[in-house]
Image (tube, rainbow, N blue to C red):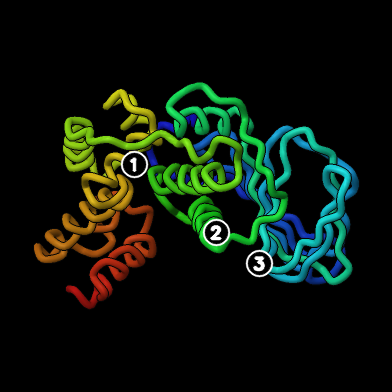
Amino acid sequence: MKLSPGGFCRGMIILMKSKKKGEKIKVWRLTDIDGIELRSGVAVKEPYPRHWHEEYQFCFIQAGGGELFYRGASHHTPRTSLFIVHPGEVHSNRTETGCSFRSLYIDSGMVGQITSEIAGRKRELPFFSRTMIFDEEIINEYLLLHLAEETRATTLERESAILEMLTGLIARYAPGGKGLRKTGRESRAVKQVRDYILAHYERNISLEELSHLTGLSRYHLSRVFAKEAGMPPHAFQTQVRISHAKKLIQAGHPLSDVAQSTGFADQSHFHRHFKRLMKVTPGEYL
């Protein structure tokens, strides 16, 4: 995952509206993580002809439904289903009623790297045995990932969401997924990460940065930190930011200055996390 130098990731957004009334497709990429493209569509009726792409495609159907023609079979894609298309596989889509969706395209090199990190050894690209997924836990992780890539989430949040979604899919639906690398106790690495986040809490730290710091893979680091600290690195960083924000509010600093100095993208981003953790808004706390 290639990271942009500093700052908050805002992503490149391209908005496209089709000629048919009500249809809308949005496509965007991230400025802090290479190898990911996201799309969301509303009331799309135009069919996708036979095509293929180099990336893994994941697509969640939010409303409506349709058909996916893939690997010699026709698959019904109803509302709340998630389908997977592997790199290089020819497929097509059509719908009679219109379809609203959230799609994610992940570079196969990134998937291969994460798969090897999860296993703790070099692995081939995973093949998911099921085209259609109705697993609520996996789907919830997918939606959290998609929303994290669309909103002003930190790089730690984005990377963690990618790891969690792929880990769940590989563990349940890829051959050999049951033999995932087990976590042990890595107290020294966890302390290094805690100290680093405490010292640089306002920065947009990445898992890759913490991986270089500790010598552990991103996957293994995220797992052992969550096991020993009780929460993943991105949640720990947010908690530290809110702790510092409380002190600044108590000292009389303007809320806009508090949001900026503690590393939040803007006041709405600060407000959302403060309310989630404190159960009151920053203004109410003041």
- Separation of residues labelled 3 and 1 (CA atoms): 29 Å
- Image x and y of residue 50, in percent: 89, 44
Residue at point 55%, 35% (across, down):
176
Q: Secondary structure at mark 1?
A: helix
The reply to whether discs 2 and 1 touch (Cβ–Cβ < 8 Å) is: no
The answer to whether residue 70 is seen in the rendering is: yes
**Mark 3, other Cα within 10 Å: few <14 / some 14–19 / many ≥20:** some
According to the picture, the residue beneath numbered tag 3 turns out to be 80
- Separation of residues labelled 2 and 1 (CA atoms): 21 Å
- Image x and y of residue 203, in percent: 30, 41
Quadrant in the picture for residue 259 = bottom left
Lower position in the chain sequence, tag 2 or tag 1: 2
Q: Nearer the viewer, mark 2 or mark 1?
A: 1
Residue at point 62%, 49% (across, down):
13
Label ID, residue 143: 2
156 and 18: which is toward the camera: 156
Q: What kind of residue is marked 3?
A: Thr
- Image x and y of residue 278, in percent: 23, 70
The answer to whether residue 14 is seen in the rendering is: no
- Separation of residues labelled 2 and 3 (CA atoms): 11 Å
Rendered view: 254 above or below 234:
below
- Image x and y of residue 158, in percent: 45, 46
According to the picture, the residue beneath numbered tag 1 turns out to be 223
